Structures are given as C-alpha cells and as structure tokens.
Amino acid sequence: MVAVPGSHTGWTFITNHARVLAAIADNPNIRIRDIAAHCRLTERAVQRIISDLEQDGYLSHTREGRTNTYRVEPDKVLRHPAEAGLTVAALLSLLVRDETDRIGEPGSRPAPLATAGGTSE
C-alpha cells in the first residue's frame, strides 16, 4: 500500500487532477483506494477524476482480471491557454519523483532550480 502523506491545511499549487495523474504515472497498476489515500481524496472523487482524464484523452485503461492498468498519454497538450504547448510529459517530469529521490539515498541531491535568468545555481 502507498504511504499516506501527513495532513495539510490551506491552499496548494497542484490540482487534484494533476495529483491523480502523477500517482498513476508513477504506478500504472495502482488501485483507486491507494490513489485516494495518497492524494487525500475519497475513492469516489478519484473515480470522477479518472473519468474526466479518460474522457478528455489524457488517460486510458485496460482491465486485466480485477486490475486496471492505466496508460497516460504523454504527448497530450494541457488544456489551459496559459500552458499552451506544455505536454503531460513535461508536467509529469516535475511531479513524478525518481525512486532514488523518494528514498533519499545518501549523496543524492535534487537538481538545481533554474533562476529567472534561465541558468541554474
């Protein structure tokens, strides 16, 4: 089962749709129950979000026995005009952590952020 993050109050930068999509991209066989726990949503809310994402072509799934295997469409362009030209893959590259980042391996360090001038550090 996916570890549940601590509680949070106040606003956040990331939408629930992006959180659900990132959880699925991180594990295409993840259960709705685990997505809900990870994203701090109800299972019904996760089902609605998955339906939205499938309806607009960002996500599809195949049923294998009792398991769904999801497929994210990485080349699909984001909906909002402010993100014109930005793909799902670009968004997910910011949201889905590499396994070494997740476990905090000694000596590993996150990549430096770009500054306003376009250079890093």
Image: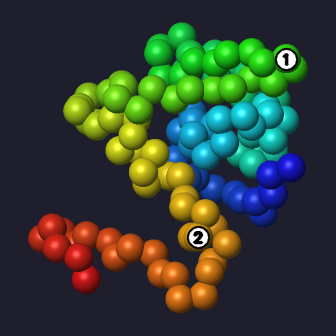
Relative side of 26 to 57, left or right: right
Tag 2 residue: 100
Image quadrant where residue 65 sits: top right
Give the residue displayed 71% in from the left and 59% down from the top: 8
Image quadrant where residue 82 sits: top left
Secondary element type, mark 1: loop
Secondary element type, mark 2: helix
| Disc sitting over residue 65 in the figure | 1
How far apart marks 2 and 1 lie (CA) works out to 32 Å
Of residues 75 and 41, the one drawn nearer to the viewer in this rendering: 75
Residue 98 is at least partly visible in this image: yes
Amino acid of disc 2:
Thr
Residue at the extreme top of the image, as rendered: 55
Q: Position of residue 22 (x, y in %)?
A: 57, 43
Q: Position of residue 5 (x, y in %)?
A: 76, 60
Relative side of 90 to 4, left or right: left
Give the residue displayed 57% in from the left and 18% down from the top: 60
Q: Are marks 2 and 1 in contact (CB under 8 Å)?
A: no
Residue 7 is at least partly visible in this image: no
Q: Position of residue 120 (x, y in %)?
A: 23, 76
| Disc sitting over residue 75 in the figure | none
Give the residue displayed 55% in from the left and 59% down from the top: 97
